[in-house]
C-alpha cells in the first residue's frame, strides 16, 4: 500500500498555480518579442521617411544655391570641380532619366554626383561612368534598396514634377510610411507604393487590398 501511494505521488502533474506561472512567463516573452518587432519596424519606417525628406531638402538646397536642379544643371562643370554635365536637355527644369536608371550619363544618376560635389550628400564624387560598379556608387536606403529621383510620373495621372522613389521596402513598412507621410492609401495622394517596373513607373497596390508583408515594394513620394 505504501509503494502504491508513493507511485501516485510521483505521477502527479503540474498544479494550477504552476501552469498559471508558466503561461504568464510565456505571455511576457511573447509580449517582449512583439514589442521589440514593433520598435524595429518603427525605426525602419522613420529611416525611410528621413531619406525622402533629406533627398528633397538636398535638391532644394542645390537649386537655391545654383538656380538649377542637380543632374539637370547645364553649368555644373563650371561651378563644381569634377562635375559631369548631363547629355540630352540639361537646363530644362526636369530630371531626365528614371529613378532606377543604370545609365551613367542620365540626369537621374548624375544628380547624385552634383549633390555630393556640392557637399549636400555623402558618397563617391567621381564620374559615375568611371565607377567600378554603378550599383555600389548609387545611394541606398536602410533596407538596402535604391533611392532615386525622376520627373517622369511613376503612376499615370499623378500630378507633380519631382518624384523620389525607394525600393526594397516591405509591405508593413510601406504602409506605415504612407500612413505617416500621407493618407495611408497605396494608390492615392502624395505617397504611393507598389511593384516597380524598369521604365521608372510603379504598379500601385490597390488601396482596397492589404499589401503583402513578405513582398518588397517600391514607394514613391511627390515633392
Image (cartoon, helix red, strand yellow):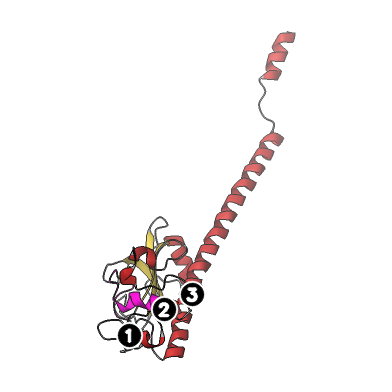
Specify whether residue 109 is in view. yes
Count of number-bearing discs: 3
Q: Quadrant of residue 26?
A: top right
Looking at the picture, tell me which residue is in the foreground, 91 or 192. 91
SS type, badge 1: loop
* For marks 3 and 2 on the same chain, the one whose residue lies earlier in the sequence: 3
SS type, badge 2: loop
* For marks 1 and 3 on the same chain, the one whose residue lies earlier in the sequence: 1
Dividing the image into 4 quarters, which one contains the C terminus? bottom left
Specify few, some or many for label 3: CA neighbours under 10 Å numbering under 14, 14-19, or 20 or more.
Answer: some
Question: Is 164 one of the magenta-colored residues?
Answer: no
Q: Report if the CB atoms under discs 3 and 2 are less than 8 Å apart.
A: yes
Specify few, some or many for label 1: CA neighbours under 10 Å numbering under 14, 14-19, or 20 or more.
Answer: many
Q: Which residue is mark 2?
A: 190
Q: Residue at x 69, y 34 (%)?
A: 18
Residue 201 locus on image (x, y percent): 30, 72
Q: Height in image: 197 above or below 188?
A: above
Residue 147 locus on image (x, y percent): 40, 70
Q: Which residue is mark 3?
A: 181
Q: Report if the CB atoms under discs 1 and 2 are less than 8 Å apart.
A: no
Specify few, some or many for label 2: CA neighbours under 10 Å numbering under 14, 14-19, or 20 or more.
Answer: some
Residue 168 locus on image (x, y percent): 39, 62
Q: Residue at x 51, y 63 (%)?
A: 44
Residue range in magenta is 94-114
Q: Report if the CB atoms under discs 1 and 3 are less than 8 Å apart.
A: no
Q: Residue at x 71, y 36 (%)?
A: 17
Q: Quadrant of residue 75?
A: bottom left
Residue 94's label in the rendered image is 1
Front tag of 1 and 2: 1
* For marks 1 and 2 on the same chain, the one whose residue lies earlier in the sequence: 1
Q: Height in image: 34 above or below 26?
A: below
Q: Height in image: 91 above or below 206?
A: below
Amino acid at each position: 500500500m505504501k509503494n502504491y501511494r508513493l507511485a501516485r505521488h510521483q505521477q502527479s502533474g503540474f498544479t494550477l498555480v504552476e501552469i498559471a506561472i508558466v503561461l504568464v512567463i510565456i505571455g511576457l516573452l511573447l509580449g517582449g518579442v512583439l514589442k521589440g518587432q514593433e520598435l524595429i519596424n518603427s525605426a525602419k519606417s522613420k529611416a525611410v521617411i528621413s531619406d525622402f525628406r533629406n533627398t528633397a531638402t538636398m535638391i532644394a538646397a542645390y537649386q537655391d544655391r545654383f538656380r538649377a536642379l542637380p543632374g539637370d544643371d547645364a553649368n555644373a562643370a563650371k561651378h563644381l570641380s569634377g562635375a559631369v554635365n548631363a547629355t540630352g536637355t540639361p537646363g530644362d527644369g526636369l530630371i531626365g532619366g528614371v529613378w532606377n536608371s543604370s545609365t551613367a550619363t542620365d540626369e537621374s544618376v548624375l544628380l547624385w554626383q552634383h549633390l555630393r560635389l556640392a557637399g549636400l550628400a555623402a558618397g563617391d564624387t567621381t564620374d559615375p561612368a568611371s565607377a567600378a560598379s554603378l550599383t555600389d556608387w548609387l545611394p541606398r536606403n536602410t533596407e538596402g534598396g535604391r533611392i532615386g529621383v525622376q520627373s517622369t510620373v511613376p503612376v499615370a495621372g499623378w500630378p507633380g514634377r519631382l518624384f523620389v522613389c525607394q525600393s526594397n521596402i516591405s509591405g508593413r513598412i510601406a504602409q506605415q510610411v504612407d500612413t505617416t507621410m500621407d493618407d495611408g492609401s497605396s494608390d492615392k495622394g502624395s505617397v504611393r507604393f507598389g511593384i516597380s517596373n524598369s521604365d521608372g513607373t510603379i504598379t500601385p497596390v490597390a488601396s482596397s487590398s492589404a499589401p503583402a508583408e513578405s513582398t518588397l515594394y517600391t514607394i514613391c513620394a511627390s515633392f
